[in-house]
Amino acid sequence: RGWVVVSGGAYGVDGAAHRGALGSSGATVAVLACGVDRPYPRGHAALIDRIAEQGLVVGELPPGDHPTPSRFVVRNRVIAALTRGTVVVEAAYRSGSLVTARAAQRLGRHTMGVPGPATSARSAGVHELLRGGATLVTDAAEIVELVGDMGELAPARHGPVLPRDLLEPDAREVLAALPARGAATAADVARGAGTTTDDAIARLYELRSLGYVERHGEGWKLTRRAVISARAGQGGC
């Protein structure tokens, strides 16, 4: 729809946001907390290369500089400054995405939140943000309604949307490769999803940040939320 997605290139929601933009032939910008010649995290080196081809990879630091914890905090203000609005998805109290949201608020930009289950620690930060004046949003259309031009309204909803329907295709394949009961190693998941182990691990971390999977020893297993979502998708109309 002509919008640019700006994020930090990290595992989890960052990576999902970038892949969503790339998958729809859209533009995306990765703001790094290091030199642009030091793609970080290393597991996202291929993703950052794709972003450089289809969008932009930017950073304040000179080539050769490595990321440090304090540089991530400083970097987040750049993400806020480059956008009309900031969306925080399932963030805990100490999440770095809240730093970005607060920077956006200081700049007078829109701040939006997508919480998870009310009892989840990963929702606590978003709940705090919403209490502080951020807007609750459900999908991209509602985001555009806020940050877009006059008249760009979100369509009326005509039926339920299952949470897993909002996942990118690669993430859905990895989710579907996990057994309904018990745990599986990343290598097993990769074989089931028809992808590489590195890519499966990246998708598993994204799914964990969204509350679908959790670590179980050396393996991964579905959370109760993911099982309920799967059952809902199998129900009749």
Image (cartoon, rainbow, N blue to C red):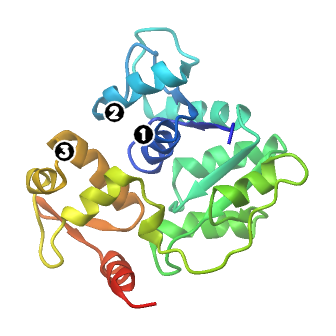
Three-letter code, disc 2? His
Q: Mark 3: which secondary structure?
A: loop
Q: Position of residue 107 (x, y in %)?
A: 81, 40
Asked if labels 1 and 2 touch by Cβ distance under 8 angstroms, the answer is yes
Q: Which mark is residue 10?
A: 1
Answer left or right for 187 relative to 110.
Answer: left
Residue depicted at x 33% and y 84%:
234
- Looking at the rendered image, the disc whose residue lies closer to the viewer, 3 or 1, is 3
The Cα–Cα distance between marks 2 and 1, rounded to whole angstroms, is 8 Å
Answer left or right for 232 relative to 58.
Answer: left
Q: Which mark is residue 195?
A: 3
Three-letter code, disc 1? Ala
Label whose residue precedes the other's in the sequence (2 or 1): 1
The Cα–Cα distance between marks 2 and 3, rounded to whole angstroms, is 15 Å
Q: Residue furthest right?
A: 150
Q: Position of residue 172 (x, y in %)?
A: 33, 59
- Looking at the rendered image, the disc whose residue lies closer to the viewer, 2 or 3, is 3
Answer left or right for 97 relative to 77.
Answer: left
Q: Position of residue 112 (x, y in %)?
A: 70, 58
Q: Nearer the viewer, residue 1 or 9?
A: 1
Q: Position of residue 227 (x, y in %)?
A: 30, 80
Q: Mark 1: which secondary structure?
A: loop
Q: Nearer the viewer, residue 174 or 186?
A: 174
> Where's the N terminus, which quadrant?
top right
Label whose residue precedes the other's in the sequence (3 or 1): 1
Q: Residue furthest top?
A: 63
Residue for badge 2: 44
